[in-house]
Image (tube, helix red, strand yellow):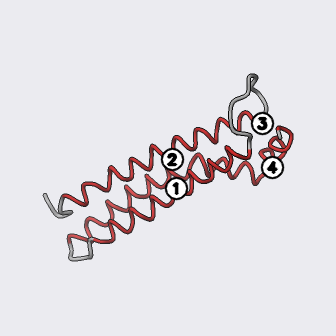
Amino acid sequence: MQEGADRYFNQGRGILMLAGAFLLAPFGWFLHQQFSYLLVYWACGGGPVFLFHLGTLLFLLLAAAGAYLAWKAWNHSGRGWADEGGSVADRSRFLAFGGMLLSGLFGLAIVAQWIPTLVVDPCVR
């Protein structure tokens, strides 16, 4: 199992999986914040407010995609922790676990940013 994971995560596809697992959720949070700021002016001008909710769903799906990639990389790298570190599979396992944690954290941050749009009118000054 270790040799297969070492080969997989040394190639471009495995590296892209780990990068996506680690970066999709923070990027989704950043885009959600920018999208929400952009929509405030439009919603105050009479645009539909439901786009806030639609954007939140879209960016939560992006964070969930990062979590899925992290879970998939975690399974592919052998789940669990080795006694000795230093191999490609160990590094990949660590990055996959970190990606799962980051996806959960930034998923919660997206939900936390969404709550005010449920409660407060976007045009309140």
Q: From the viewer's perspective, tell me whether residue 43 is left or right of residue 9.
A: left
Label 3 environment density (alpha carbons within 10 Å; few <14, some 14–19, many ≥20) = some
Residue at 33% x, 61% y: name it.
36
Measured Cα–Cα span from mark 1 to mark 4: 24 Å
Residue 68 in percent (x, y) is at 59, 54
The residue pinned by badge 1 equals 64
Label 2 environment density (alpha carbons within 10 Å; few <14, some 14–19, many ≥20) = many
The residue pinned by badge 4 equals 11
Q: Are marks 1 and 4 in contact (CB under 8 Å)?
A: no
Helix, strand or loop at disc 3? helix
Name which of mark 1 and mark 2 comes first in the sequence: 1
Residue at 66% x, 50% y: name it.
72
Q: Are marks 1 and 3 in contact (CB under 8 Å)?
A: no
Measured Cα–Cα span from mark 3 to mark 2: 22 Å
Name which of mark 3 and mark 2 comes first in the sequence: 3
At label 4, which amino acid type do we have? Gln
Q: From the viewer's perspective, tell me whether residue 124 is left or right of residue 27.
A: left
Q: Are marks 3 and 4 in contact (CB under 8 Å)?
A: no
At label 1, which amino acid type do we have? Ala
Q: Are marks 1 and 2 in contact (CB under 8 Å)?
A: yes
Q: From the viewer's perspective, tell me whether residue 66 is left or right of residue 120.
A: right
Label 4 environment density (alpha carbons within 10 Å; few <14, some 14–19, many ≥20) = few
Helix, strand or loop at disc 1? helix
The residue pinned by badge 3 equals 88
The residue pinned by badge 2 equals 103
Measured Cα–Cα span from mark 1 to mark 3: 25 Å
Residue at 18% x, 58% y: name it.
120
Q: Are marks 3 and 2 in contact (CB under 8 Å)?
A: no
